[in-house]
């Protein structure tokens, strides 16, 4: 009898991807007039990073559930290194949530050079006169000063944890 060679067998497994759920929009830009069409959002999968100057900062606001959010505008000027020409300024509306929104409200000033990272969106709508509009928006994951134009002093902020209506510092135990 001839001895058999040992062979390794592998079991092929296939995983099926879970259905992708569309995220509900945070808010919609719907003009007040009944004749106008509501805004449509185009979401992009990849994050972007932009460096630009803060144009305006709105007041820090809170949702009905108590979550902080803040909007600010940022001007970004594309630069072509080959021709050494600057393009036309592109304006973004940046939206921050939670602790990032609170920190941005305390830190950002008009004219400040910032680095923004987040998910881009494109809002499109038609006003009551039939004109189409577009607004570029970034849902921010991070915002910081551009250290090529500023000196920053970084200090760690302890995050607050809410448990049964009481506030505790991150290091403290809630019992």
Image: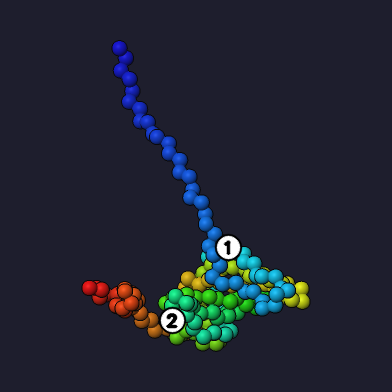
Which residue lies at the image location 62% right of the left edge and 77% below the top edge? 91
* Residue drawn at point x = 43 percent, y = 78 percent: 66
Q: Image check: 161 left or right of 56?
A: left
* SS for dot 2: helix
User: x, y percentage for residue 108?
Assistant: 49, 84
Residue 79, quarter of the rendered image: bottom right
Q: Residue furthest top?
A: 1
Quadrant occupied by the C terminus: bottom left
Say which residue label 2 marks.
Answer: 103
Please indicate, yes or no, whether residue 61 appears anywhere in the rendered image.
Answer: yes
Give coordinates of residue 123: x percent, y percent: 63, 70
Q: Are marks 2 and 1 in contact (CB under 8 Å)?
A: no
Query: Observer-nearest residue: 78 or 157?
Result: 157
In the image, farthest residue toward the left:
175
Establish if 16 lies above or below 127.
above
Q: Nearer the viewer, residue 122 or 89?
A: 122
Quadrant in which residue 72 is drawn: bottom right
In the image, farthest residue toward the right: 129
Mark 2 or 1, nearer chain start: 1
Q: Closest to the observer: 106 or 60?
A: 60
Q: Local crowd at mark 1 within 10 Å, few (<14), some, or many (≥20)?
A: few
Compared across the picture, whether 133 is left or right of 105 comes to right
Q: CA distance from mark 2 to mark 1?
A: 26 Å
Q: Which mark is residue 44?
A: 1
Tell me residue 76's x, y (percent): 60, 77
Q: How many marks?
A: 2
Most foreground residue, 145 or 43: 43
Image quadrant in which the N terminus is located: top left
Instruction: Give the image location of residue 168, x and y in percent.
Output: 29, 77
Q: How is the image coloured?
A: rainbow
């Amino acid at each position: 009898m001839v001895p058999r060679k040992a062979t390794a067998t592998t079991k092929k497994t296939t995983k099926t991807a879970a259905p992708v759920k569309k995220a509900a929009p945070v808010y919609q830009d719907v003009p007040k007039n009944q004749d106008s069409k509501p805004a449509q959002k185009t979401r992009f999968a990849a994050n972007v990073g932009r460096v630009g100057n803060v144009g305006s900062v709105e007041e820090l606001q809170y949702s009905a559930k108590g979550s902080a959010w803040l909007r600010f505008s940022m001007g970004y000027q594309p630069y072509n290194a080959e021709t050494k020409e600057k393009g036309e300024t592109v304006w973004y509306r940046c939206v921050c949530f939670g602790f990032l929104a609170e920190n941005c409200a305390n830190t950002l000033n008009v004219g400040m050079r910032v680095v923004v990272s987040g998910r881009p969106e494109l809002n499109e709508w038609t006003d009551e006169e039939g004109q189409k509009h577009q607004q570029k928006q970034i849902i921010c994951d991070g915002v910081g000063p551009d250290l090529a134009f500023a000196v920053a002093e970084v200090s760690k902020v302890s995050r607050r944890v809410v448990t049964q209506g009481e506030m505790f510092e991150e290091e403290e135990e809630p019992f």
